[in-house]
Amino acid sequence: SQDPAAASEELLRCIELGHRGAIISGTADTKARGVDAIFEDSWLRFWDIAEETSTPIHVHLGGGLHSLEARPNSWRFPAMVAVIPMQLDELLAGMLFSGILEKRPNVKFVLGEAGLGWIPYVLERLDHELHKYGDKCLDHRPAMLPSEIFRRQVLVTYEDEEFGVECLPRIGFESVMWASDYPHGDSTWPESRKAIDESPLMRLGEEAVRKITFENAARVYQIE
């Protein structure tokens, strides 16, 4: 639901049913639809529930585009698919600067199918702009660097990248989860194991492979 009150009640219902996490529609481009972005004050109760119950909250790529659309049998479709993960940048910035995550350290925030390559650049920009403008923020000034909040609470998922994998030491091995993306067209299925074996991820060592392919997910979703 994009209604914060309804979403809060649904989150409680799902937690009571035993769900290990929840996904919400998180695109920051919401004003035209008359709804609040998830880092606005109307969502505070939702985030308080997630904090009190240590429930991971997920958003997935989608929305944020202004000039490209998913038009089948057109060049517009691959063009849209290529850039849509980066539309999560605005949402990530809002969550890191607003205090939503900083004040709720028990909340893990997962960017689904976000990809990797753009993450270090955005984190560097966020830290830089906090240094530039932080003393002018009268509503909330983060006490931690956005990159520090990110590494404490945010995880991103990816499927099959080369440059993004090269960025993993900058992002942090504990902040990334690999996904097969089955059954979508971008999926590595049914050759997912082969894709991992041939990925530059293997050059980062056994610990990195273990964390990114299963240990991080087991930790976030409390799977033993």
Image (tube, helix red, strand yellow):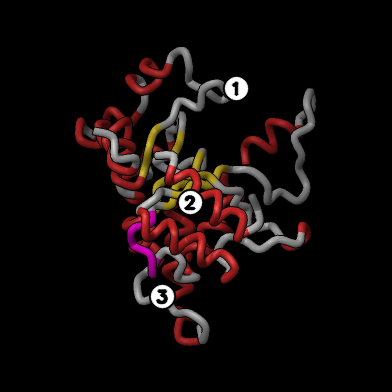
Residue at mark 1: 185
**Label 3 vs 2, first from the N-terminus:** 2
Residue at mark 2: 12
For the residue carrying disc 2, how many other residues have a C-alpha within 10 Å: few (<14), some (14-19), or many (20+)? some
Q: Are marks 1 and 3 in contact (CB under 8 Å)?
A: no
Residue drawn at (44%, 59%), measured in percent from left and top?
49
Q: CA distance from mark 1 to mark 3?
A: 39 Å
Q: Quadrant of the C terminus?
A: top left
Q: CA distance from mark 1 to mark 2?
A: 33 Å
Amino acid at pointer 3: Pro
Residue 173 to residue 200: above or below: below
Residue 7 to residue 194: above or below: below
Residue drawn at (51%, 60%), measured in percent from left and top?
46
Residue drawn at (50%, 41%), measured in percent from left and top?
112
Magenta residues (range): 102-107
Residue at mark 3: 142
**Count of marks overlaid on the render:** 3
**Tag 3 secondary structure:** loop
Amino acid at pointer 2: Leu
The residue furthest top is 190
Please name which of the two marks, 3 or 2, marks the residue nearer to the observer.
2
| Left or right: residue 121 compared with residue 196 | right
Query: Residue 165's image quarter?
Result: top left
